[in-house]
Image (cartoon, rainbow, N blue to C red):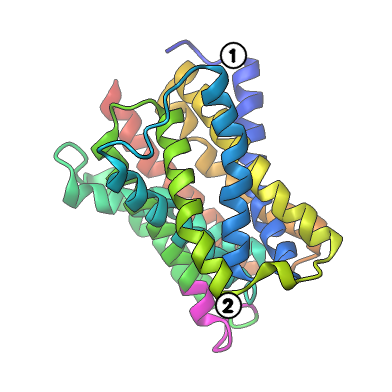
Amino acid sequence: MRQPKLLDYILLTILALIWASAFFNIKIATYSFGPVTIAFLRVFFGAIPVLLLCYFKNIKIEAFSKDWHWFAMIGFINLVAPFFLIAYGVKSVQSNLAAILMSTTPLSSTVLAHFYTKNEKFNFVKTIGIMIGFSGIVFLFSDNLLIDENNFISALLILLGSTCYVIGGVLTLKISKKKNENVTGSILIWATIILIPLVSFIEQPWELTPRLDSTISVIYLGLVSTGIAWLLRFRILVNNGLIFQSQVSYLIPIFGTILSYIFLKELITFKVLISLIAVCVGIYFVRKADYQKTI
């Protein structure tokens, strides 16, 4: 891995902006589309740039190889379930809250790694980070102005979507020796296959007359926030490594909150700001512990 240059930091910032922009675009997409349709269109359009890259780089797609069951399982847990849960939750919850709730992924992955891996155990710094980060989420749920009995379950579903990403990441370790582009392309194929009958029977999107802004947002979610973002992530990982790429975790909730205010004029309360700071501080301590372990 090489030392990060200015271009690397610019690409990292772009990646954070792309992923953060997904939340307000999901909100706009829900104006016309149901959560299953949003999930389907995300994986369908997201697969296009990934599969094109695999084609031009002559990378074999192993979606239907002997490991197909891993690709199908990861496709469901890492794409189908969280895309549906986030879209369903954002219908009733501000998108800036979704950005903060989803940013708990590094904290949840640290907890899960402690129990399911041999070399990722808790230490004092990680424990402090986890406690601070999740305290921020608990504090966020106490904001009765934004989270009440009408959308409490929706907020929990977004947290569950975050947990699905973590579980999917752990399962991906089972096929970690395969190329990232192959794995991503294969799980996108299986996610699309799984969602075709679901979207056909549950929502029948061909009967919709969607708004233009919703249509643009859902295409953007697929092509950019899913497909191009994953390819950009690959480039950063190859050039700079996981520790550098993981810094995107700090930026996503911050950018998500700012973009939601700019584009949707969503309310930012005092408790939102405190929760945002707590989550970012918690992630910082967890990442600091990981960094210290590598040097």
Q: Give residue 110's position: percent from left, percent from top.
A: 30, 48
- In this view of the protein, which residue sits in the foreground, 3 or 201? 201
Q: Secondary structure at mark 2?
A: loop
Q: Secondary structure at mark 1?
A: loop
Residue that numbered label 2 is attached to: 143
**Is residue 239 inside the magenta stretch?**
no
- Dividing the image into 4 quarters, which one contains the N terminus? top left
Residue 143 visible in the shown view = yes
Q: Which mark is residue 263?
A: none
Crowding at dot 1, Cα within 10 Å, few <14 / some 14-19 / many 20+, comes out as few
Residue that numbered label 1 is attached to: 5
Whole-angstrom CA distance, mark 1 to mark 2, is 40 Å
Residue at the outermost bottom position: 149
Side of 27 relative to 194 (left or right): right
User: Which residue type carries mark 2?
Assistant: Asp
Asked if 257 appears above or below 113 in the picture, the reply is below
Q: Give residue 87's position: percent from left, percent from top.
A: 59, 66
Residue at 29% in and 20% down? 295
Side of 87 relative to 79 (left or right): right
Res 263 → quadrant: bottom right
Span shown in magenta: 146-156
Do labels 1 and 2 touch, CB within 8 Å?
no
**Is residue 147 inside the magenta stretch?**
yes
User: Which residue type carries mark 1?
Assistant: Lys
Residue at 65% in and 52% down? 22
Residue at 59% in and 20% down? 8
Asked if 14 appears above or below 193 in the picture, the reply is above
Residue at 52% in and 81% down? 152
Q: Give residue 59's position: percent from left, percent from top.
A: 45, 21
Residue 226 visible in the shown view = no
